[in-house]
Amino acid sequence: MTQAPVVSTANLFQFILPAHQAGLPMEELCAIAGLEPSRLYDYETTYPASVVKTLLKKAVEHSGDEYFWLKAARPELVSTNNLFLYILFQAKTFSEFMLRAERLYNYFTDELAPTHRMMDDHYIYQANFYNPEPEVSPYRVDWWFAISTLYSTLFAGEQYKMTEIHLSAPFNDRADIYEEFFQTPVLINQPQLAFCSPLSNLDLPNIRNPHDPHLEQLLMHQLHSHMQCSSPSATFLQKIHEVLRQQLPNGTPNLDSVASQLAMSSRSLQRKLADEGSSFNEQVRLLRSELATHYLKQQELSISQIAYLLGFQDNRSLTVAFRKWFGMTPSEYRQKNTVPEHENA
């Protein structure tokens, strides 16, 4: 028997936030999703894809706007799932952007896997939903077209072109609104939900920010850590470190907030750490010292930036802590661990 598709908590947020902005109380949205509010940041949890269908419908009913999900995609939502989207927008060209988008969907959900294929002088970017089409919400289709075209335009700018939208039979009745909304011809009774664009799109550069190899390395390191800590085999300490890593840029992590994100009481967290022969403060120290040495080996990050990433108020606080950990200052450590340029040649 095939397992029903699921979505991650991170993926669920892209539907919860617009619905909340439309006026639906967060408590009601959590109830719809079967989410405990205390587990909103528990990224290892997955939910049936049917939850998304219910959220989509509720938002339309509450707003009274049948096309709510076409209009809900807005630029500020680009950072809803920061880690994944920052990696996506580190691509150099639109071709790389497309490939990254296809791979990153695997981290969000197994309900949908978009792919693209070449056809003469254009390419087709298609949605592949794993639910049978009659079970796919038309609002989910609205959102996919809207968010895909938004991200594409934000990446490549006005030079990005879409030449056709393809609708499969269950969604033919949305052809007129799509044609009006996207100002693009719509073909019905097509084998897949897709849009077509000229091959020239694939060479378009990223207009938002120049590619930063160092940031790319840090993001991929974070992604690897996230996936490792979200796996069923992740240890308790790995999960704590993942939460701490998220909180460090906001200052020294707080026991209560970390416990809340792990869906447990502060006392239970302390007790489990004691069983591991450790303490909360010890884990903060271990992670900070590990990240400090990792960041210092990356020459592009300043000492001030590293202090911020580790949750210190200023350079001096980082220097005092680093000297306790390693018997030298951050600058001295960096000097000792810098690889000469001729060795990288």
Image (cartoon, grey):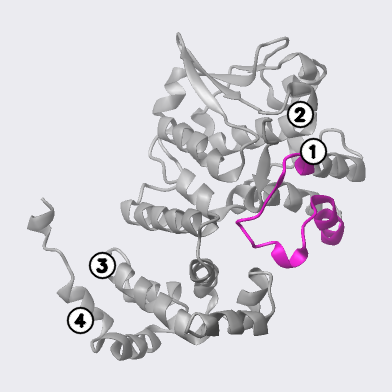
Looking at marks 4 and 3 on the same chain, the residue that comes earlier in the sequence is marked by 3
Looking at marks 1 and 2 on the same chain, the residue that comes earlier in the sequence is marked by 1
* Crowd class of label 1 (few under 14; some 14 to 19; many from 20; radius 10 Å): some
Q: Indicate which label's residue lies in the foreground, 3 or 1.
A: 1
- Name the foreground residue: 244 vs 82: 244
Q: Taking the image as drawn, is residue 312 in sight?
A: no
Per the image, the residue denoted by label 3 is: 297
Q: Is residue 242 above or below residue 152?
A: below
Looking at marks 3 and 1 on the same chain, the residue that comes earlier in the sequence is marked by 1
- Marks 2 and 3 sit apart, C-alpha to C-alpha, by 48 Å
Q: Amino acid at mark 1?
A: Lys
Question: Which mark is drawn over residue 136?
Answer: 2
Q: Amino acid at mark 2?
A: Val
- Marks 3 and 1 sit apart, C-alpha to C-alpha, by 46 Å
Please state the extent of the stretch shown in magenta in the rendering: 25-53
In percent of width and height, residue 335 lies at 17, 75
- Secondary structure beneath dot 1 equals helix
